[in-house]
Amino acid sequence: MNKNEWDNSLMEYFAPKKGELSLDLLMEMVAEMMETAPENVLSEEAPPSAMTLNWNSIPNIPISEIGWSAMETKDGVEVPSAQRSQLAQFLSGIEKGKDLSAKIEALSNFYKMDESVRASFEGGDMKQNIAKAMSYLVFFKTLTQILTQFNASSAGFSFESFLGVLLGGKQVQTGEGTIADLTDETGVPISLKLYKEGNLEVGGSFTDLSRDLRKPEFKNTMQYIAVTKTLSGEGMDQQGTLDWYRFNFNLDNLYNIIAKSSKESRKNILLPKVFIATNGESVEGVPEKATSIPSAEEMENEFYDILTSIIAENEEIISQQSGGNFSLEDLKQSLDFAKSETLFGGNKIRGKDKMAVKGVIQSLKASVLRDTELKQTQMKETAIYKAIVKAYGVLAGRYKRDEQKARRQETLNEMYFYDGLSEEELLERSKAFYNAASPELKIRCLEYAYGYISNGHFNLTQGMVQKISVLAGDKAAQLFPEGQSQVRIGQLEIGASNIQQVLSGLSGVLNQNIFQIFESLKVLTTNIQGYFAGGLTDDSKAKTAITAAEEIETKTADIADVEK
């Protein structure tokens, strides 16, 4: 049994499993530990005799293992990793079957721990109350770790995984040709945005968005979940709030919303003069999509092909500089070429705008160079950094503006900007035509909208998101999922010190046996670790561990007998 298996076996028992606690499983686990404990487990000082339930008492999920990459396919069926399964077991106790807004409300109420919440834990099935409490506590601890222990790129990826598990869905792998980051339990596609408060941007490739809205399997809808974080402090001492927003882009509201988006973003919805004049029958003279820059998703695959070739030429030095732990798949996930908001500057148009030095370095720190102590200037000199820059240079060179593309732009200008009309007049004309069109014609409009033909980038600021109902105007009927009436769906507080207040509130509510079980578990593991790490010479540690195991047996039996 290695260290991870040791820790996982401790957590497995306390993950909610249909409200049941298995005494036999626990005692079998203790027996196995006593027989097979590893000699190289971490050695810790013995905990104080008077212990209280605290941050360290909450089960810890290895965050690095969460994510679609931890899903294995066996016999055509996706099988989650042990870590992902544990997280899913714990989070299953949070308003099971309810949508995100209900889960956020329940989590927020639990955190406040007012009289009504306290009362809900005083009656009923004690085992179910314990399982529910553990679900909520693991949620807050895991989310706090994601947002305080990782850089923006890694936190964003882990946050996608975490939310996917909470919603019973999964992450969408890169290269799938969609703007969606994850899906929920029912298959609803979701694009997730995580930004600092005040800096929120809901945006991306208009080409990808328009393609997704034309997909019948997506029901012509793309849901956006935007989260802003307000944190203070450093490292694990950080604490603060998360504000949650949610809305749907669909065929009905798209043009109204984009028409009120950022200045350059608005042009995306313009339709060619000939298209409007013929009620969508003619597109004569409109350049084909194939002649323009590919979508971010298409360009991502092309970039990785180039990068793979360059890495192969420098494999030895790259492996050496990364400490022998180089993984191309880890690098791809960290770069997140098609969707990352930090990897590019400007309008973030792949193949046109420059890569951001800081974004590239953050990705390297989170993947192939995470175990190094190189400074930023030193990282820019590594072979892998140079390989990324070179690969992007080759890619951008393939789509560099030339005379043919300049003539194409002149043609686009003639087709979409005509008759001396102002941009506002052109927008109103296109919007009116689109809103009056049938669903079938709306889909055709998206195939010839300026943003699709020219690979435009759409953008909504935080203020725009907060006023999304106003932007949608008379097309706000399905702007929100059923049961939701406004874009903001709640706020959550996070932070180790904040969670300690919740634990203190629980101490007077839940059966004290659960606290004593956790205390005994801590004593058990610490003393077994010390006993084996010390070469099996300190019998006092072994005796203390045995006593703790007996206490666990007694208290667990008490809980199991509560309803008998």
Image (spheres, grey):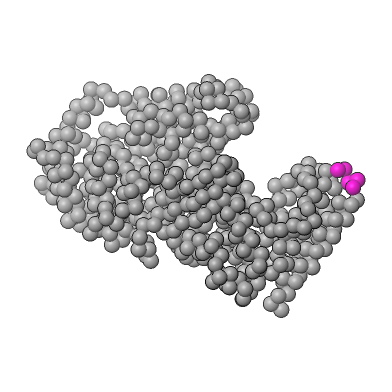
459 to the left or right of 125? left
455 to the left or right of 159? left
Q: Which residues are magenta?
A: 534-538
Magenta part mainly helix, strand or loop? loop
Q: Nearer the viewer, residue 151 or 400?
A: 151
As displayed, is residue 14 above or below residue 224? below
Magenta region includes residue 537: yes
184 to the left or right of 487? right
Instruction: From the top left corner, tell me how far across and down residue 71 is, in percent.
Output: 56, 49
- Residue shown at 45%/25% (left/top)? 389
- Residue shown at 88%/55% (left/top)? 543
Q: Nearer the viewer, residue 398 or 153?
A: 153
- Decide if residue 71 is in sight here: no
Instruction: From the top left corner, tell me how far across and down residue 91 is, in percent.
Output: 56, 59
Task: Give the number of callouts.
Answer: 0
- Residue shown at 39%/45% (left/top)? 198
Q: Nearer the viewer, residue 320 or 192?
A: 192
